[in-house]
Structure formats: C-alpha cells, structure tokens
Amino acid sequence: MKFCPECGSPVQPEAKFCVNCGQPLTLSAPAPRRAALRIPPGFAAVFLGVLIMGLAAAGVLIRQHDKVQAQQQGAQTAANLPPGHPQVELPAKAREFISNLQAQAKKQPKDIALWNRLGSVALRASLFDPAYYRLASDAYGHVLQLAPDNLEALRGIGNLNYDRQKYDEAIAAYEHYLKQKPDDPDVQTDLGTMYLYTGNPDQAIKRYQKAISIKPGFFDAYFNMGVAYGAMNDAVKARDALNQALKSAPDQDAKARINELLAKLGGGAQMAAAGGASGAPSQQGAAAPNSFRGRIESMVRGLPFAGPKVESVRWDSSTKATVLMNNFPMEAMPPFARQKFLSDIGAGIEDAKKTYHIDGTFELQIADAATGQVMETVSK
C-alpha cells in the first residue's frame, strides 16, 4: 500500500493525488498487478520478496477487483490538478444519485439486486471518497443478512475488505464464495493474493495454479505466482512464472513491468552468486572473506533482492555492525516480507557465529544510508 507523504493516509494503487489532503503523488516503481484485466491494471502493496520493497512503495500484485471507470476517471481528474489542489470530491450529481439510490433501497429492504447495486456504486465512489466504504459495507452486509450465500455480495464484501486491508475478512468472504463457485479464476486469484498478503505464499501459489487450471494462460495468475515464488526466494520458479505471464501480457506497459521484475530477479541472483566479497567495501575496508566479519558482510550482500541495496557495512565493534541501505524503505514492507527479511538476517548471523565459534550476542543494525536512521536491529 502506498501512503501519502504529506498526511500519511493510504492511497489507491496508481492514484496521482491523495484523496484526503490533495497531495500530488507519483509512482516510482512498477507493481505486481492486481486482478481483472477488464480494468486498467492497478498496483497494490505486495512486494516481490524483499526486492519489491526496494522498488519503492508500490506493489505488484494484480487484483481481479473491478474498479473500472471510477478509477480511470479519478486518475484523469487528478492528472489535471495543480500542485496543492484540495481534495477532489465526487460531482454533486453523483452524490445525489447515490443518495437517491440509498433512499430507494431503504424503501425496498428485501430487494437484493437493488442493495447489491448500492454496494457496488458505493464501493466505486469510495475511490474518490473513503467515507463511502461504510455505505458499501452496510449495503453488502444487508444483502448477506437476507441471503448469506449471495455471490455478488460475497465478492463485493471481499473486495471491500481487500481495499481496507482487512485481509482475514476478505479471505473468509472469498472462501465462502468459492465453495459455491470454485471455477471462478478471478476470485481464486484474489484469494491467492490475500494469502500472499498474510504471509502464506505457498497457499497463494496453490490458488494461482487453480486459477490457471480453470483459465489456461491466465496472465494475472502467472504474474502473481511469480511474485509469490519471489517471496519464497525461489528465483527460478519466479522467473518461469513471469516468463509465462510475459507471453500473455495484455499491453506494452505490462510487458515493461514484467521485464523490469525479471531484470531485478537477475540482479539479485547475480549478487547472491557473487556473495558480496567483490561488492562495495565497508567504510573501514572490506572484511577478509574467510572471517566472521567477512561472513556477515557476504550474508547481507547476498540476501535475496536486498543485497543490491547495501551501500556499506560499518563495524562499530567486534559485536556490533550497521548495514547502510540505499533506497530501502522498510516501513513500506508488508509484515510477511519484513518478517522474512529479518528472519533471514537472524539465520545468517547464527550461521556465521556457529562457523567461527563466536560466543555472546552480536547486534546488526539496518540503517538508511541517506539519513543514518536505524530502521531495525537484529540481535543474536
């Protein structure tokens, strides 16, 4: 998920302005794309392992969530705003339409189609004004009280919770939907993405595989599968899946994004193979490769996807070092990616200590090279 640098509010994938404060936004990196390609590709905050985090605060997962005209119109409107323009609101006629639809639905509380329509309209309106999420939630919730198995409402509430980052609730809705309609490749893909967001890439891959079995050559599922394999540090399978996605990419923009990810995968693999011994020296000179310090430096430079972001390793003492990272915004990492990154570092430290018979606690700080700010500390 991207966040507004001015007010910190979450912003929609590919948004060009913040709906809360009007701050102009830019996408600094490609993203795993979200699902249904009947919409313009939108990019969410999931990262290809730790590297996607290094690609900046844009994710890469495709979602099948149907955003269509509302997002297109929002992006076009935002593109014409001058810097510092205040929040863009829905046109008065649109608000009046929604208000009238809501009033009509209240008069017909058992009209499931009408309430679903209200939920759909409100969900699209929420792309302009997040306050409409509540109306969408209430509308879909009303339908599910009347008809707990209603597919449109289940998918709608799943999409809403996807947007609101309530991933467990989205998973529950999508799973219930798929019990009745298991042959829906779009929802299979969305469910896989929710598993990936919650730190279960192996389950995500099973869903993507299921989607492909239903719809062979399904671009969305292959793309997201590549991201999931990347999160599992399986560069070979990630590359294979992305190459399959490349074959069915819907446009040149999608192809460019895939090629960039493939290039990054290649760079990560090359760095891992190099092991860091021939990389940039630490501020106090590169440590001898056959030593505890050399092993630590080699480990951090060889981390999948994160290694190329290491500027230097500063040794503050024999039991403490600081890794200075370039363009590595840890605060933007999804929880599972952050956990995996720190777990890999911890395992690397323990391995180095065991190899070189180091007793006591060793502390490794991860800091931003530009500011010196310590982002995380791993002690083993």
Image (cartoon, rainbow, N blue to C red):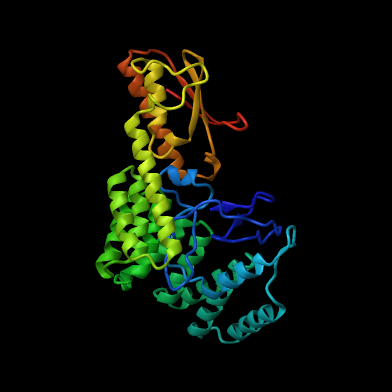
Q: In the drawing, does residue 309 fall left or right of residue 359?
A: right
Residue at horizontal 52 percent and vertical 61 percent from the top: 163
Could you say which is closer to the camera, residue 157 or residue 324?
Answer: 324
Residue 4 rendering spot, x and y as whole percentages: 64, 52
Could you say which is closer to the camera, residue 141 or residue 298?
Answer: 298
Q: In the drawing, does residue 102 fall left or right of residue 232?
A: right
Residue at horizontal 55 percent and vertical 83 percent from the top: 109
Residue at horizontal 65 percent and vertical 59 percent from the top: 18
Residue 88 rendering spot, x and y as whole percentages: 70, 67
Residue at horizontal 41 percent and vertical 48 percent from the top: 48
Total labels: the figure holds 0
Could you say which is closer to the camera, residue 169 or residue 342?
Answer: 342
Vertically, is 48 above or below 16? above
Residue 114 rendering spot, x and y as whole percentages: 53, 84
Residue extending farthest to the left is 213
Q: Quadrant of the C terminus?
A: top left
Asked whether residue 176 is in view, the answer is no
Q: Quadrant of residue 274?
A: top left
Could you say which is closer to the camera, residue 191 or residue 51?
Answer: 51
Asked whether residue 82 is in view, the answer is yes
Vertically, is 61 above or below 112? above
Q: Quadrant of residue 302?
A: top left
Residue 166 rendering spot, x and y as whole percentages: 50, 57
Vertically, is 135 above or below 107? above
Q: In the drawing, does residue 1 fall left or right of residue 242?
A: right
